[in-house]
Amino acid sequence: MILRMIYRAAWQKGQEEAGLLALKESEQAKQLVKQGRLMTAAAFTWRNNLFLYYECIGQPVEPGEVAGAALPYLADWPGQTELRKWIQMVDVFHFNEPAGYEHWLRKQPVERRGGRVAHLKPEMMSSYIYYHYQLQEERAFGGDKYEIIAMHENLLFGYQEFPKVVEDPVVPGRLSTKGTPENWTDSRMDLHFQPWDDDGYLYFKPVDQVFAYYIGEM
């Protein structure tokens, strides 16, 4: 069993540089991959945000085990009885999902692992999820095997690997309907996103990688 986990954290004011240094010097994530507890582990940073993407083998792994070195530099998140450092982001779209250990192993070298972010218009969040869940579970068309998009509030974080791997999912879809527009542009995703400042990006923009490890590269 492979569990895909995505977490978001925020740096304390003025602590990003020190936190990133501590994270880069730490070998927590690397050791978990070497031990066979994680298949892939990657971290990305953008503005005051820190994102974790990792794949648990068999049993869940807490984010503090993966990036505990960053903990003293992270801000607290309110909203629950106990304050939290890490917010688990919600998986809102993937073309493929793990059917088991062998299925999820990379069959060719990964040249690059990337993270990217986008903001949805708050009033369009439910529409975005609706269209993407249909596409995902109707298996309307194929795409990158390892791509995944997660959400917290109206912020989207996406993980990708290059070169892209496109193959039919092994796990059956959960819908028998045919509601996905035949022409995907009819879903008008262009109306769902908040425009960025004039920097050339329309939807998603890339973010900086902190580290990335994979079990086949150890």
Image (cartoon, rainbow, N blue to C red):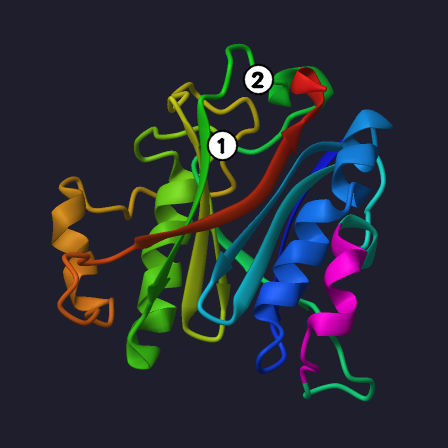
Element type at marker 2?
Answer: loop
* Residue type at numbered disc 1: Tyr
Q: Can you see residue 200?
A: yes
Magenta-colored segment: predominant secondary structure: helix
For residue 134, above or below residue 190: above
Could you tell whether 157 is left or right of 11 in the image? left
Q: Is residue 127 above or below residue 1?
A: below
- Expressed as whole percent of the image width and height from the top left, the position of residue 203 reads 24, 58
Q: Are marks 2 and 1 in contact (CB under 8 Å)?
A: yes
- Left/right placement of residue 141 relative to residue 138 reads left
Element type at mark 1: loop
Quadrant for the N terminus, please.
top right
The residue that mark 1 highlights is 146
Disc number at residue 106?
A: 2
Q: Is residue 63 visible?
A: no
**Quadrant where the C terminus is found in the figure:** top right
Residue appearing at x 34%, y 79% in the figure: 122
Instruction: Say whether disc 2 or disc 1 marks the residue closer to the N-terminus.
Output: 2
Residue range corresponding to the magenta coloring? 67-77
Q: Is residue 146 above or below residue 22?
A: above
Q: Mark 2: which amino acid?
A: Arg
Q: Position of residue 78 (x, y in %)?
A: 68, 88
| Quadrant of res 82 | bottom right
Report x, y in % for residue 107. Answer: 55, 10
Give the residue at the far top of this rendering.
Answer: 107
Percent across and percent down for residue 64 are 80, 58
Specify few, some or many for label 1: CA neighbours under 10 Å numbering under 14, 14-19, or 20 or more.
some
Answer whether residue 94 is magenta in the image: no
